[in-house]
Image (cartoon, rainbow, N blue to C red):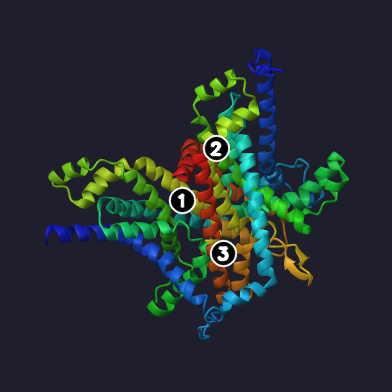
Amino acid sequence: MNRYSKDRLVFWLFLLPALVAFLIVVVIPFFMGIYYSMTDWTAISGRNINWVGLENYANMWSDVQFRYSFIRTFIFTVLSVVTINSVALFLAYLVTRDVKFRNFFRAGFFLPNLIGGLVLGYIWQFIFKSVIPPLGGLLGIKAIEEAVILGDATLTLFGLVFAYTWQYAGYIMMIYVAAILNVPKSLIEACEIDGANFWQKFRNITVPMIAQAITITSFLTLVNSFKQYDIIVALTGGGPSTVYGAAKDVVNSTELLAVHIYEVAFVYNDMAGGQAKAIIFFLVLSVVSIAQVVYNKKREVEL
Amino acid sequence: MVKDNTKTPSRKKISKTAALIVIIICFAVTVFPFFIVVINSAKSSLEIINEPIAMPNNIGQLFKNIGEVWSSNTVRYPTSLLSSAIITSFSLFFIAIFSSMAAWVLVRTKTKMSAFIFLVFISGLIIPFQVVMFPLVQLFSASYKVLGIKMLRTYHGMVLAYIGFGAPLSVFMFHGFIKSIPLELEEAATIEGYGRWKIYRKIILPILQPIVVTVLILNGIWIWNDFLLPSLILGIGNRIQTIPLSVRFFAGSFVKKWDLIMTAVLMAALPIIIGFLFGQKYIISGMVSGAIK
């Protein structure tokens, strides 16, 4: 064997294990998925699969729950991105100051991130149902005592954002901490000598210096909020139901897109419909997240 | 009016104390759910309904609840723990080896094919799981019907899925690191008569150690806590189930025994919290550097 073909053999031998696994579980299913989205595929075995063209893509918009899930997913994503990043930045500011036990606090804020979404969903379900009302009673606030958080469409969405922030803010905080520690001390000191107040320092020094981290954290929180599934399944199960639109259709208020896609396929046996929605989900997520990165990258330069 | 911002020592001390108080409040909110889980794991079914926010009457109840969850036929905690450990460790082992092998040859081979394959791996980073999950299940069940190879509800099917889904990020991270390793080392080893496998094993792998730790932590926490993928491949309530699946199977049932659910949640969270206490420094820095790269 000559040297050239031996190099080629080594190349493929080293590459194949990872590549084959990746092809089997991601690449092949991805192309199968595009095909299935244009068929009448159901979960019922033994039924023939027929080509229907773009029918599933055309029909999905007449599904009230899908339109509603879309809107709710956007609301949830915007709320989560804003809340998680604000809380994370605030915590990062606190734990990068000269305070006692700051490493201990950092680790503590980070800890919820290690609890899986499914498990923490049950923790928060218990808190919202059984802990918040007696806590309200203890504080003597009637509104809290009588609040049925998981029975109200709006409150449940806020509850989800809250539980998700509890899980994720500590992780995002650590990214901000790493960025803030990289801001040169001399820059801040110079600013202080010039008599800048807290807000001026934050706006003119810290934010531009951590712009790169903001791009990363916005991307991470956006993509992961949009795909949220585990917490919802355990915390709300998609409920409670509510009415939507002029026709007063009954919809599940926290059945966000990732949950909706699963429900359509496995509960309603419409695998092809679920697959077509998954592809729209993928396209929307790609466009939104790329737009976000491009926008933030542009800002990084301007700042 | 010109405001004086050079703080006097006493003002500085006040703001320091204020910051500490705010931190403690935030910290209390953060640990409150853990506190709720712990105190309610030590309550009987009656106690948890009547006094969910009171301290438990009898700490001994905690061990009684743990015993009950441990021997429960729905949770099957010992076997679930074992399955989680088997799946996580085998997946991590193969992800680290296979991804670093692939990344190494992708960096060192400068051909169009090599660049293209790297791009294919990277594209996997933006594909959400939802797009591939139904066809994947279909493919795995077809593998049994057509080839007679059982993939669903098996360890090897689960581990294969994790190798595939873990590959894009892991290859990407190894790729970035290997680019910075000077080629001279490998050239010298080739002159010494080392083969490619020996160079990988004896030279590259030891240099990769810090990034291997990062890859193991990132993938390890994801795999240990993952729910949707194992629920599709293994199914809920079947012979092989991971910890999140067993929590779902138990807590998702119609009658909610919250005292035992809280105990199960505590027992599910405990292994990873213990792991965190031991490897805290590596875990935090690993997860943060994983995000920044």
Q: Residue at x 52, y 34 (%)?
A: A209
Q: Quadrant of the N terminus of chain A?
A: bottom left
Earlier sequence position, callout 3 versus callout 2:
2
Residue closest to the far top: B9
- In the visual, does B20 lie left or right of B119? right
Residue A175 at x, y percent in the picture = 52, 39
Q: CA distance from mark 2 to mark 1?
A: 22 Å
State whether discs 3 and 2 lie on one chain.
yes
**Host chain of mark 3:** A
The amino acid type of the residue labelled 1 equals Asn
Kindly indicate the quadrant of the structure image that contains residue A91.
top right
**Callout 3 secondary element:** helix
**Host chain of mark 1:** B
Vertical relation: A110 (above or below) B138? above
* Residue at which label 1 appears: B219
Q: CA distance from mark 3 to mark 2?
A: 29 Å
The amino acid type of the residue labelled 3 equals Phe
* Residue at which label 2 appears: A176
Residue density around tag 3, few if under 14, some if 14–19, many if 20 or more, within 10 Å:
many
Q: Residue at x 49, y 26 (%)?
A: A184
Q: Which mark is residue A281?
A: 3
- In the visual, does B89 lie left or right of A177? left
- In the visual, does A258 lie left or right of B99? right
Residue density around tag 2, few if under 14, some if 14–19, many if 20 or more, within 10 Å:
many
User: In this view of the protein, can residue B53 be seen by the observer?
Assistant: yes
- In the visual, does B110 lie left or right of B14? left
The amino acid type of the residue labelled 2 equals Tyr
CB under 8 Å between callouts 2 and 1?
A: no
